[in-house]
Image: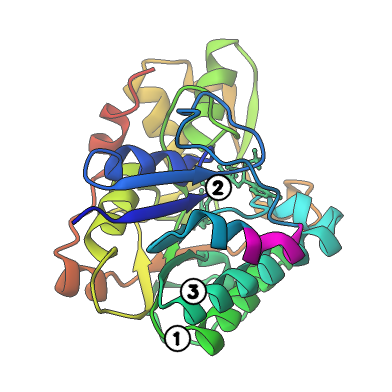
Amino acid sequence: MTNRVLITGATGLIGRGVYSELGTEHEVILTARKISNLSPNDFHPYDLSKVDGIVNFLDRLKPQVIVHTAAVTSIDEVAQNLDYANLLNIEATREIAKWCEENNVRMIHFSSDFVFNGLKTNYQELDLANPISSYGKTKLLSEQAVQSILRNHLIIRPILVYGYFDGLARMNFPLLVLSNLRSGKKMEITEDQLRMPTHVSDVSEIVNKTLFSEETGLLHIAGSELLSVYDFALKIADHFQLDKSLMMPVKTHSANRDESRPLISGFDLQRAKSLFGYHPKTIEEGLRFLAI
Ligand SMILES: NC(=O)c1ccc[n+]([C@@H]2O[C@H](COP(=O)([O-])OP(=O)(O)OC[C@H]3O[C@@H](n4cnc5c(N)ncnc54)[C@H](OP(=O)(O)O)[C@@H]3O)[C@@H](O)[C@H]2O)c1
């Protein structure tokens, strides 16, 4: 049986990863606003902030599963344009969840580690979420919308996802480090923010495993190592043999940003490991996949 899977945010990092993982096994259809360099036959452009048209759009495409990755993903952009971010991150998600419930369709929804306030290295799925940024608040409200409307859902929270595809919609951290160091540009990088960076293939593999599973609820996904963002940058520079002296470690309070970022973001991955055999890559393994 072929299953028709719709990926929203298909030109983004996670959307691209999921497409490359599922593309050969399922009938995959894609959406975002601009096509980028994806297959035009599979691509159906739509602006999901036009919430009133979502039902018609989905009625026309008739997916059997929806992997919903589209969102305003920049923490600063959310703060600068909160009304729009609320529309896309929360209201569009709610509308998709409603359509899924009415049409008996499973939804894999992407949330974020930024729903937590960043004080623990091992957050579990049911720990109290308490976001400190506008972005984190939109993601938490999107989770609550899905949970209250749709029975057959899985909400994946990943941490600092990285990877490379040609024509990506947005930079991710290692790509930014590589671009700056290769052009001899100095960078200030926070040394007091801890993360578990996740290679995009770990995320897309878990989506494949959970696509038709009967498991519902929240799922934490992350890489296998907790380290500071500065130490991650050092590993990137080492791996690609670039000049580390261009990178200056700074404390978060001097990084000159308006929106708060969680200081510590680490997950307990037990649920993903026991239910889906999740086995994330080390940083070294993930960097080897970054063949750029
Ligand atoms: N990457 C991470 O480190 C990370 C960490 C935690 C959680 N997440 C979550 O994972 C999900 C995917 O993240 P990502 O990093 O893959 O995002 P991304 O690279 O920023 O891509 C966002 C995607 O959403 C689409 N999009 C934006 N506005 C849209 C609109 N109005 N209508 C339709 N599509 C729209 C973009 O394409 P167009 O601009 O062409 O429309 C793009 O395809 C998000 O929900 C994010 O919150 C990501």
Q: Is residue 181 above or below residue 1?
A: above
Q: Is residue 117 visible?
A: no
Q: Residue at x 50, y 54 (%)?
A: 61
Q: Which residues are magenta?
A: 50-56
- Near mark 2 (Cα within 10 A), the count class, few <14, some 14-19 or many ≥20, is many
Marks 2 and 3: CB-CB under 8 Å? no
The amino acid type found where label 1 is placed reads Asp
Q: What residue is pinned by disc 2?
A: 9
Q: CA distance from mark 1 to mark 2?
A: 28 Å
Q: Which mark is residue 127?
A: 1
Residue nearest the observer in this picture, 122 or 291: 291
Q: Is residue 277 visible?
A: yes
Ligand 1: does it lie within 8 Å of the C-beta at label 3?
no
Q: Residue 235: image x %, image y %?
A: 37, 33
User: Tell me, what colour scheme is on the image?
Assistant: rainbow
Q: Quadrant of the N terminus?
A: bottom left
Q: Residue at x 68, y 53 (%)?
A: 72
Q: For the residues carrying marks 3 and 1, which lies nearer the camera in this image? A: 3
The amino acid type found where label 3 is placed reads Cys
The amino acid type found where label 2 is placed reads Gly
- Near mark 3 (Cα within 10 A), the count class, few <14, some 14-19 or many ≥20, is many
Q: What residue is pinned by disc 3?
A: 100
Q: CA distance from mark 2 to mark 3?
A: 17 Å
Query: Counting residues from the N terminus, which is met first, the one under dot 3 or under dot 1?
Result: 3
Q: Quadrant of residue 283?
A: top left
Q: Residue 63: image x %, image y %?
A: 43, 59
Residue lying farthest to the front in this orientation: 60
Q: Residue 30: image x %, image y %?
A: 48, 43
Q: Residue at x 19, y 61 (%)?
A: 278
127 left or right, relative to 216: right
